[in-house]
Image: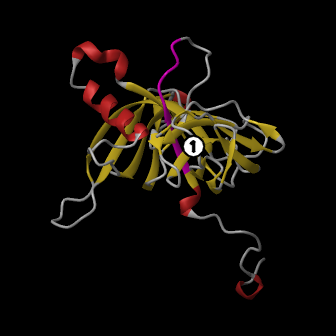
Amino acid sequence: MTKPNQIAPTRGRNASTYEWIFDVAYLPENPGDPFNWVNIPDITALAPNSTATTTDGATYANQGQASPITTGESFNLNVNVKMVTDDDGNPIVPVAMLLEAANALLDQDRASDRVLAIRYYHYKVPQWAYQFTADVSWTRANTGNTDLEFLALTLAAKGDRKVIPNPAREGEVAPSLVNALPASAEEGQIVRVTGTSLKGITGVTVGGVAAAYVLADPTAVYVTMPAGDPGDAPIVAKVSGSDTAPLAYTRA
């Protein structure tokens, strides 16, 4: 029997709440086509909620005792997202996607626009990685006079949540660049580039010109726009010795 004075804290690294990552994507036009995932960085209070769906399996042999059999789950994901907008009031692309999906629920002619693909996963723990499709609804998380505006999102799964290979684990997803904001930037401005498996990044070029960068996490890198002529300036990252496919970008 273990005695209290024999119990010591477990050695190892403590997982942190901020190490969860949350991505959204439109459903691909053709089943089996890859998803174009976009990361949402400004999240908090991410809370998965699963309730078992059961049916009664009791027979006379149970002698009056309950015998529930689990057949599935009812699942939703709650998460708060900070509303960050540009000077015109437009939210970042993935937040706009969520808002449009929520608005589509109010329009019977936009049934195909209501559902988004969702995935959430932990940066360090390989078993914590899930994907599902969902209807989107929201309310305001803060309503005070001087509060920051946060959306309290509820993502109701369509019964298809599954375990996936953890995208944050090195080597499981090919490095790629997905999105860059703002959509156009001048020399010296910072561009936030999102993608997948960027942990091993060793360089970034914009229009073929080397650029300074700071890796935020395996899905995001901040790039300082180098000198160059306005116009097309594709962004390429070198990750683990190989170049990603160019991400189309326009230099202001």
Q: Residue at x 62, y 15 (%)?
A: 32
Q: From the top left corner, tell me how far across and down residue 221 is, in percent.
A: 61, 51
Most distant residue in the right direction: 241
Q: Residue type at mark 1: give it.
A: Thr
Quarter of the image holding residue 15? bottom right
For the N terminus, the image quarter is bottom right
Residue 49 lies left or right of residue 128; in this view the side is left
Q: From the top left corner, tell me how far across and down residue 250 is, in percent.
A: 51, 34
Comparing 237 with 21, the one in front is 237
Above or below for 28 versus 228: above
Residue highlighted by disc 1: 194
Above or below for 124 versus 33: below
Most distant residue in the front direction: 229
Most distant residue in the bottom direction: 5
Q: From the top left corner, tell me how far across and down residue 53 is, in percent.
A: 46, 33
Most distant residue in the left direction: 145
Above or below for 88 versus 4: above
Comparing 121 with 23, the one in front is 23
Q: Residue at x 47, y 32 (%)?
A: 54
Comparing 212 with 102, the one in front is 212
Q: From the top left corner, tell me how far across and down residue 172 is, in percent.
A: 76, 38
Task: Identify the magenta region.
Answer: 21-29
